[in-house]
Amino acid sequence: MLIKPPVSINIINGSGKAFFLSRPRRFGKSLFCSTLEAIFEGRRELFGEMAGLPPLAINSLDWEWKKHPVIKLDLNARVFSNGVEALHSTLFRELKKEAGKLGINIDEKDCISQFAGLIEKSCNITGEKTVVIIDEYDKPLLETIDDPQLHDKIRKELKGFYGILKSYDKYLRFVFITGVTKFSHVSVFSDLNQLSDLTLNQSYADICGLTQEELEIVFKPEIEKILEISGKNENEYIDELRNYYNGYRFSEKTLTVYNPFGLLQHFNEDGKFRPYWYETGTPAFLINLISKQKINILNLNNYKISFDSLYKYDIENLDALPVLYQSGYLTISDYDEEREQFILDYPNLEVSSSFAKSLIKQYLQPEAENANSLIVRLPNALLDGDVNEAINVIRQFMACIPYDIIKDTENYFQTVVHLIFTMFGLNCRSEVRIASGRIDTLVETKNYVYCFEFKLNGTAEEALAQIDTREYLLPWQGSGKKLFKAGISFDYEKRNIGEWKTAEI
């Protein structure tokens, strides 16, 4: 993965000295922390030529390469759900490791005193101010979020521990803290008032992750190897990579980046497109939160949220949308400057299709064996322009849903169809607003556009007529694609599609 020292230099050469960065899990935060650690330890030899690129800009900038004592705490690979003792054990272990690295003896009995002693002693012994880097500061909080009592105890412990950074500020040269979330009631934010938050700063939008340009330069050998193995066209393969793994956006700036973990796994697996990042974490908590707050699943890719709310994370009043964004299941798709609002969307095909599968398991609970057998047929039908076969596949899928959980609302049936399309990786949008009205569901492929109108208490003929009367497909005429309309009537007694009518425009 590409390390970005010039960005590091911008941080450490600037006027600030304490920074926070939030990014989703497995997004390169730990590697960036290691980069900062190496810079402050004066390890210049690590920053020569790499990956066929010119010498990194860090060598040409005014950087003293003075060695500082560095305390780097990593709270990621630990289990904290066993109680406060697990937190203490982790902190003691991390502090002991760092003290040993610096050749310092810390004999204080509690971890807060040890942290304070390590900062002060490392500064006094070396004659240089100390650098503190804390990776995944919020892991203990995230892991205990389903246990409010334990969560509150751990929050109080961390408040005292992180509060040392303010009390011992005179010994500190630089502080860098990473995490997935920004807990407002932790002292690192409420007490450390000099902390600069880089999370939504446009200048650091690509501080973690890989841009399109970086992908095509750094991974050129891997790309060429996969093209040779697969026989794919280079432009089509690059587009496929972009659609499946790119799309994360972290500021008003339109720049998007790839999640590096998914890319690395993709290249390690000889170009197989799989949800590698998604499979590393189960979003069961998020799915339950969406259900509890009655979030409209159809509009998950079109929610608007203010700047302040985007990083609201309050355990007493947890809001699903900021959590979905911070966790990487949604990202910024646009910014409304006049209203100062961000518009959220799924970042890419990996996340949208995988998250839809998780939602289907929660909301629809289909028999897995029968549902999985339909995975190939539905996308193939729509890619081939066979809308009637696609509807037949949907009927078979809906027949797998337990009878007693189906609701007698048009929105329920529309949601089922939307999730099915999305789960199979299709470009599907629901409740699409155009000048003449609102389209229930629209699916686009390379060669076709499908407009679906649904009725629960109405006929398929009426649904089809509505598409014509309101000219739903007018914006796509002249696109060069074949246009299909489909009117579908749901039969609640049968818990399935009753009749349907289709036509090509």
Image (cartoon, helix red, strand yellow):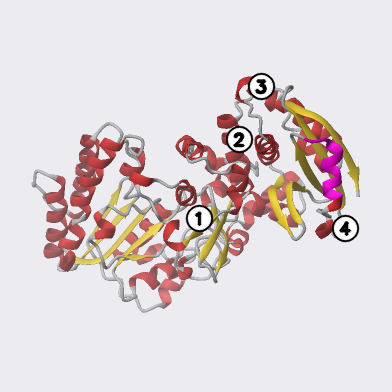
* Residue 1, numbered label: 1
In the rendered view, does 275 fall on the left or right side of 136?
right
**Label 2 or label 1, whichever comes before in sequence order:** 1
Q: Which residue is mark 3?
A: 369
Q: Nearer the viewer, mark 1 or mark 4?
A: 4
Task: Give the CA separation, mark 1 to mark 3.
Answer: 38 Å
**Label 3 or label 2, whichever comes before in sequence order:** 2
Foreground: 13 or 404? 404
Which element is circle 4 on?
Answer: loop
**Label 1 or label 3, whichever comes before in sequence order:** 1
Magenta stretch: includes residue 464: yes
Which element is circle 3 on?
Answer: helix
Where residue 496 sits in the image (x, y, percent)? 74, 27
In the rendered view, does 36 fall on the left or right side of 190?
right
Q: How many marks?
A: 4
Task: Give the CA separation, mark 3 to mark 4.
Answer: 38 Å
* Number of other residues with Cα within 10 Å of mark 1, as a class: few under 14, some 14 to 19, many 20 or more: some
Magenta stretch: includes residue 233: no
Q: Main secondary structure of the magenta part?
A: helix
* Number of other residues with Cα within 10 Å of mark 4, as a class: few under 14, some 14 to 19, many 20 or more: few
Task: Give the CA separation, mark 3 to mark 2.
Answer: 14 Å
Magenta segment, which residues?
458-468
